């Protein structure tokens, strides 16, 4: 099975995986997805950024699930499998990042404040190609 | 006061799901508003349309589309697009025109025809568009509503019963509104038995997408003349943008701003604040509020963003009965989005229509006794939001 990113340039493909963001060289604000043009901090006129790997662990800010198949461009397996979604607070970056929760974790197992880590998992498969994306996995839970 | 803008007339086409051309709903709403104002279309000097993105080119140039449909008569034109706040921005454009002295009589129109089911992004593969990316990841609008609902539960002890009570309250209000799409008095059991959409929110906690049209006639106080005593005044319109670093987990973004180097700000709390300052009024002056209950849980968030109660006490306010018609401060006496469903470019105008009917004492069975000041508030994609204060 060939493994390709479902979205190009948003995360590293080697393990352990990281989201790829950027950091303003002037004011230190982080951006995800990566921003390399003009800083969005209104107090900062910088256009110099460094690409950074964002923290790969954080705490759940809130969570939910998707009981119904989302519309395209979501690619749904047949039959559809509901999945959990978490909004995760990254401490160093002081930002919240959304993402699916790894398969097999039910929404009832999640809790605000729960520590999670970032892993890569299949978003969908097409022929012999697996399109992977970042997902949040409760810490201490094995793949 | 010469700087005042009067709401001379309002009109709506009922909300529903017919799939007819949006222009039809807009024209019927416009004619109703013109009749209500006692003016003719030929006298209108400025027409301001709220755009719709789902009805092709005529929707992108809604102001001109409505002008042509009503009959070209040379009025100056504007079209505004601002997601859920499109109607308010169209209203703000007309108000500014009048305040500047450039015209005395303006017509504002918004109408939409929506597809069934989840709102989906524009077609094509566009990884640079956050709206495309989030749908690709399976993150729909109810995802964002549910994240805030769950947060209320874990932080403030909100329960699914509270969200359900909001829906039941608004359904009881909407049952009295001939313009509402859903006029059924849903019971607690029906809400709790509806299908789960995005835990903890069920189908009947989440608003639908609807067809509908709303229109408002504005004039200078001078033009209002004899109507002046009856016509409510636009006391404020806020169309603020967020402040960096915005802490809102908001459609369509995958991530919030980073507060690593800048103070964290709540966008939603700033929306009404700006309107209160402009009007010189505050939450204690309000007789009623129309808020954007895209999900029943969000009505509780709005109680706090409007300053109706301290943070974390919205459930207490709801449970006290204060926000029902007959209570101290009715919220969504129209029935809200729970009973209308969302017709994006018309929704903010529909909220203002309700304020106007309430302030004039024309709201029939759902009349809020002695209504003097009302606020309408909404928030949508890409940093758009509005708050409109109307007073008697």
Image (spheres, coloured by chain):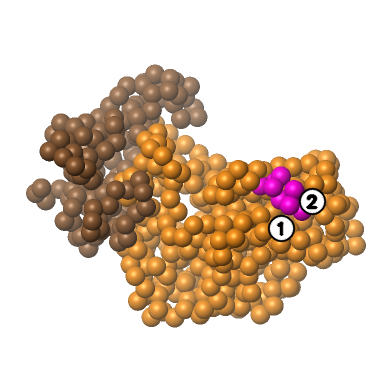
Chain colours: A brown, B orange
Number of the label disc, if any, that sits on residue B134:
none
Residue B66 colored magenta? yes
Residue at which label 1 appears: B27
Relative horizontal placement of residue B372, taking residue A57 as reference (left or right): right
Left or right of residue B177, residue B252 in this image:
left
Find residue B348 and report its horizontal and vertical position in percent: 61, 56
Callout 1: residue from which chain? B
Tell me where residue B332 appears, x and y as whole percent: 57, 68
Q: How many marks?
A: 2
Q: As drawn, is B125 to the left or to the right of B99?
A: left
What secondary structure is marked by label 1? helix
Rendered residue at 18%/52% (across/down) = A103
- Marks 1 and 2 belong to one chain: yes
Q: Residue at x 71, y 44 (%)?
A: B64
Q: Which of the 4 image quarters holds residue A54?
A: top left
Q: Earlier in the sequence, mark 1 or mark 2?
A: 1
Residue B29 located within the stretch drawn in magenta: no
Residue located at (61% from left, 78% from top): B176
The answer for which chain carries disc 2 is: B
> Where's residue B87, x and y in %?
63, 51
Label ID, residue B71: 2
Task: Pick the residue in front: B241 or B179.
Answer: B179
Q: CA distance from mark 1 to mark 2?
A: 10 Å
- Badge 2 marks a residue whose secondary structure is loop
Identify the residue at the far right of this view.
Answer: B226
Which residue appears farthest toward the top when viewing the image? A48
Whether residue B257 is visible: no
Q: Which residues are magenta?
A: B62-70
């Amino acid at each position: 099975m060939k493994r390709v990113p479902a979205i190009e340039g948003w995360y590293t493909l080697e393990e352990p995986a990281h989201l790829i963001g950027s950091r303003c060289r002037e004011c230190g604000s982080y951006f995800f997805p990566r921003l390399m043009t003009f800083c969005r901090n209104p107090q900062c006129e910088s256009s110099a950024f460094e690409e950074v790997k964002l923290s790969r662990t954080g705490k759940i800010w809130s969570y939910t699930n998707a009981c119904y198949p989302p519309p395209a461009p979501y690619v749904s397996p047949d039959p559809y499998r509901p999945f959990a979604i978490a909004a995760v607070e990254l401490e160093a970056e002081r930002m919240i990042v959304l993402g699916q929760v790894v398969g097999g974790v039910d929404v009832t197992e999640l809790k605000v404040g729960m520590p999670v880590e970032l892993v890569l998992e299949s978003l969908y498969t097409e022929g012999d190609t697996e399109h992977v994306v970042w997902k949040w996995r409760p810490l201490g839970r094995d793949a | 006061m010469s700087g005042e803008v009067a709401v001379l007339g309002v009109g709506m086409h009922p909300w529903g799901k017919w799939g007819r051309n949006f222009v039809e709903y807009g024209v019927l709403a416009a004619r109703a508003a013109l009749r209500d104002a006692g003016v003719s279309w030929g006298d209108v000097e400025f027409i301001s349309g709220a755009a719709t993105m789902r009805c092709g080119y005529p929707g992108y140039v809604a102001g001109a589309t409505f002008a042509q449909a009503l009959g070209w008569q040379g009025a100056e034109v504007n079209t505004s697009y601002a997601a859920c706040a499109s109607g308010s921005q169209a209203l703000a454009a007309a108000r500014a025109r009048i305040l500047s002295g450039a015209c005395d009589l303006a017509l504002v129109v918004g109408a939409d025809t929506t597809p069934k089911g989840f709102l989906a992004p524009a077609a094509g593969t566009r990884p640079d568009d956050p709206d495309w990316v989030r749908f690709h990841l399976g993150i729909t609008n109810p995802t964002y509503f549910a994240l805030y609902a769950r947060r209320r539960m874990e932080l403030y002890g909100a329960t699914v019963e509270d969200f359900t009570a909001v829906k039941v309250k608004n359904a009881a209000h909407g049952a009295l509104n001939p313009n509402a799409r859903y006029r059924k008095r849903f019971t607690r059991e029906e809400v709790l038995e509806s299908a789960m959409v995005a835990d903890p929110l069920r189908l009947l906690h989440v608003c639908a997408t609807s067809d509908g049209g709303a229109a408002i006639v504005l004039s200078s106080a001078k033009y209002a003349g004899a109507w002046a005593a009856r016509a409510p005044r636009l006391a404020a319109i806020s169309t603020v943008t967020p402040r960096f670093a915005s802490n809102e987990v908001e459609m369509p973004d995958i991530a919030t701003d980073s507060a690593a180097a800048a103070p964290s700000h709540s966008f939603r709390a700033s929306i009404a604040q700006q309107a209160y300052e402009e009007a010189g009024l505050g939450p204690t002056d309000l007789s009623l509020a129309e808020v954007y209950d895209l999900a029943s849980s969000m009505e509780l968030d709005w109680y706090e963003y409007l300053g109706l109660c301290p943070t974390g006490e919205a459930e207490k306010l709801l449970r006290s009965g204060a926000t029902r018609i007959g209570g101290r401060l009715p919220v969504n006496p129209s029935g809200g989005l729970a009973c209308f469903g969302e017709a994006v470019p018309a929704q903010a105008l529909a909220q203002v229509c309700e304020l106007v009917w309430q302030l004039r004492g024309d709201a029939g069975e759902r009349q809020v006794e002695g209504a003097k000041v009302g606020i309408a508030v909404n928030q949508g994609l890409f940093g758009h939001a509005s708050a409109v204060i109307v007073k008697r």
